[in-house]
Amino acid sequence: MARSKAPAKGATTRSTGTRIPQLSWHEAKPAPVVLISGTESFLADRAMRLLRDALRAEDPALEVHDVDAAAYAPGELLTLASPSLFGEPRLLRVSNVEKMTDAFLEEALAFLAEPADGATVALRHGGGVRGKKLLDAIRSGQGGGVEIVCAELKRDADRADFAAAEFRHAGRAIAPAALRALVSAFSDDLGELGAACQQLIADTGGDITAETVQRYYGGRVEATSFAVADAAIAGRPGEALTLLRHALDSGADPVPMVAAFAMKLRTMAKVGGSRGSGGQLASQLGLAPWQVDRARRDLQGWDEAGLGRAILTVAETDAAVKGASRDPVFALERLVTLVADRGHPRL
């Protein structure tokens, strides 16, 4: 079955040198040639899976073949793409196109000139200059292809769009605060974020709320609070404020943030006012030995007056974020700045 070469609805094309539709990973759809480009392997894998599912929905008899362009055997592409005896549709998933052999390049260009009827060749190119001649040919329109761009998602907004799409495709709604908290909890690994979304979809019913995210991933969300407190206590105000703003923008709750400051500063006060070995203090104060060691490290650069002032400010900030202030964010920023200055406000 020959496929249409017309641009897909809603697709965009690059302004320079590209004449084929440019699709996002979640818009993956069949074409004689599908170029899956970009450095984000997780999205590329998703796009490849969506492509396979779409083809299988068209015809359950779909044949799927995997080809490694870096270890290519001459004739493999044309043989696998050729119609079978019963004319089943074929999907050829080609990996390592950025490491292709000369033989693969030659035969892939030949395929573009005359695509096989009923075959879809999906080419995964992870970046780099190798294979530019083939990519340029595809993007010029040879073979009637489309390109699925899987660039790395560096901004929180992009990761939030990804997560929102996961729930939207599953027909589920997620509250904005829940979405921000989820993205904040898994800001370093897109694969983990995707897995978290799928777990919530599979294990829960109805709308996804902030309480749902807290129940499943509260430990990950709270880790952000301690990162802010650790940076401030260590005297790194720029880093602490950046982490704070990132956490708040991602939907973090101010209350556990203040609680993290309170717990760490009170532990520092207990350890700073006591004498003895780490093991002795741990037993006396009801702490783990590592907590005593950490508190002693945290106390470097602090004096008694500064620590006392910081603890009082924590109490004031706790009241502010629980409704006593019209601007709890300002109160949090003031706390972070004071703690980063070891309890001695700048003049």
Image: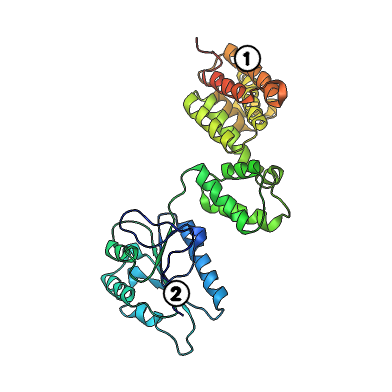
Farthest residue, direction top: 347
In this rendering, the answer to whether 183 lies above or below 35 is above
199 displayed left or right of 51: right
Q: Nearer the viewer, mark 2 or mark 1?
A: 2
Q: Position of residue 345 (x, y in %)?
A: 54, 13
Image marks 2 and 1: residues in contact by CB distance under 8 Å: no
What amino acid does circle 2 point to? Arg
Circle on res. 3: 2
Q: Residue at x 34, y 53 (%)?
A: 15
Which of 54 and 17 lies nearest the eye of the viewer?
17
Q: Position of residue 10 (x, y in %)?
A: 48, 58
Residue 188 at least partly seen: no
Which residue lies under the disc numbered 1? Answer: 308
204 displayed left or right of 51: right
Element carrying mark 2:
loop
Which of 31 and 270 lies nearest the eye of the viewer?
31
Residue 249 at least partly seen: yes
Residue 82: image quadrant is bottom left
Element carrying mark 1:
helix
Which of 135 and 152 lies nearest the eye of the viewer?
135
What amino acid does circle 1 point to? Gly
Residue 176: image quadrant is top right
Which of 305 and 40 lies nearest the eye of the viewer?
40
Q: Residue at x 65, y 23 (%)?
A: 266
Cα–Cα gap, marks 2 and 1: 73 Å
In this rendering, the answer to whether 307 lies above or below 246 is above
Q: Residues within 10 Å of mark 1 (few under 14, many from 20)?
A: some
Q: Residues within 10 Å of mark 2 (few under 14, many from 20)?
A: some
Farthest residue, direction right: 205
Q: Position of residue 283 (x, y in %)?
A: 68, 29
Q: Earlier in the sequence, mark 2 or mark 1?
A: 2
The image shows a total of numbered marks equal to 2
